[in-house]
Amino acid sequence: MAYYVTTPIYYVNAEPHLGHAYTIVAVDVLARHMRQRGEEVFFLTGTDEHGEPVAQEADRLGMTPKELADKNAPRFRDMVARLDATNDFFIRTSDERHVEGVRRILQRVYDAGHVYLGTYEGWYCPRCADFKSGNEIGAGNRCPIHGIELDWQEEENYFFRLSAFQERLERLYAERGDFVMPVARYNEARSFIDGGLADISLTRSSLPWGVPVPWDERHVFYVWFDALLNYYTALTYARDGEDLAERFWPPTLHVMAKDILKFHAVIWPALLMAAGLEIPRRLFVHGYLLMDEAKMSKSLGNVIDPFQVIDLYGTDALRFYLLREIVFGGDGSVSPEGFEKRYTTELANEYGNLASRTLSMIARYRDGVVPVAAEAPTVASDLDGLAASVRERFDAVDITGALDEIWQRVRRLNQWVQEEAPWQLAKDPAAAARLDGVLYGLAEGLRIVSVLLEPFMPEKTEQLLGALGANDRSLDGARFRPDGRFDAIGELAPLFPRLEPAEPPAASPAAS
Ligand SMILES: [Zn+2]
């Protein structure tokens, strides 16, 4: 089955930060898991390069918007690569092929009678690139998100007849209770629709930086329409000579943070209806990472900079922490102190230690060859059904829940080693068969949890599975085999080495 998953595209006027990394990592985990299931996956991310926020920032820096976009888009592309994301394409909305796609689709919307010329009057936030009304206007006519004063704007715009889609959107939400997840976000979108939809500006006439409107070149499209359509246009040109929309449209899942819910959950489906395109199957809206700046760490200071964490601890540790610490879908606090605690207690002590002690016992007691078990080790029952529950959790986009299911088994395996005490069995020649069973159970258990952890920590699990000589990375292969075979055990460096924190500089120079 085709599985098409997206992140939002990122404004090139901003620096890449932890919030961007969070969505990219989450979507990458979903994409990798689906590939383990044998699904045909397409994972899209990219940059949003048009609109007022980019034009203003370029102006401030004394460059053209295109120059700013060319300078900053690679930063996002680099971040995606450093996060080990397996995106199938990186779209830039200043790409001529995207621009042509936007013009073609919106011309169709115009031809179908969903657009008219009018005058817009209202409060506008240039940082949001959004007109504000009702409770979207903060005290003192300020943007509640940016805290800046809103501009009163009057200009000739083409309008999209959003109001004409009122009933169809109501029906969509009534028929599909999981169109938007989690349910709090579904309710938020639904109440926005129930409040009555007003027509919205489709074009701007005062801004030159955007996609020119084909039927009236004095206008450019309002950046949100241009941006949303990236999800479609990318498929039409990501592969030369192929229209991937035939295979991958509609999207299986759009993932985003809650600040852009209205555009994705209300305007986007209406626009697709107007264009005669199928609407996405599902939207998942995650929460915010709240920086707990009071919690300091010796090595990381008081804020989490994704690049610094990757430099010091590796990409996998960051990926793990982000999906372990905060329930995906809710808000949660992150801190350097919290990161280091998880790194030490869970990655180094629980998983890393399980891996190193398992491999070293097999080396010491059985010359590096995983023995055959005469009877099924008792731990097998703890691993029964794990792959199935992980699959179910992923189907519900419960990424944190999937990780927790796996982690419970990591802990169970550690507990089982203590119970079985193979170092005692090794002293008793009469317990040789029992020891074989324990070592086999540990190797097999470690293999299963590592295959299931691969979407979360692709680099470390690859090292470990390589050392175990386990080649099958499929979800189907992540079940307990009573008589599995392993290649000879290889070398494995510590997966999560303990880091000596950098000493803070001395308060005063030593006397000499
Ligand atoms: Zn704003």
Image: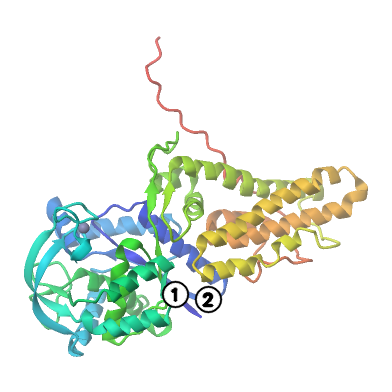
Name the quadrant where ligand 1 sits. Answer: bottom left
What kind of residue is marked 2?
A: Glu
Crowdedness near tag 1: few (<14), some (14–19) or many (≥20) residues, C-alpha within 10 Å: some
Q: What is the three-letter code of the residue carrying label 1?
A: Asp
The quadrant holding residue 277 is: bottom left
Q: Which residue is mark 2?
A: 39
Give the class, few, some or many, for how many residues have Cα within 10 Å of label 2's Cα (few <14, many ≥20): some
Q: Residue 401: percent from the left, percent from the top?
A: 55, 61
Residue 258 horizontal/vertical position (percent): 34, 62
Give whichever of 77, 446 is nearer the camera: 446
Q: Quadrant of the C terminus?
A: top left
Is 174 or 412 nearer to us in this picture? 174
Left or right: 332 as drawn, with respect to 449: left
Residue 298 horizontal/vertical position (percent): 45, 33
Quadrant of the rendered structure where residue 384 is? bottom right
Quick check: 189 above or below 365? below
Residue found at x 39% / y 10%: 511
- Compared with 453, 313 (above or below) is above
The image's mark for residue 178 is 1
Foreground residue among 173 and 334:
173
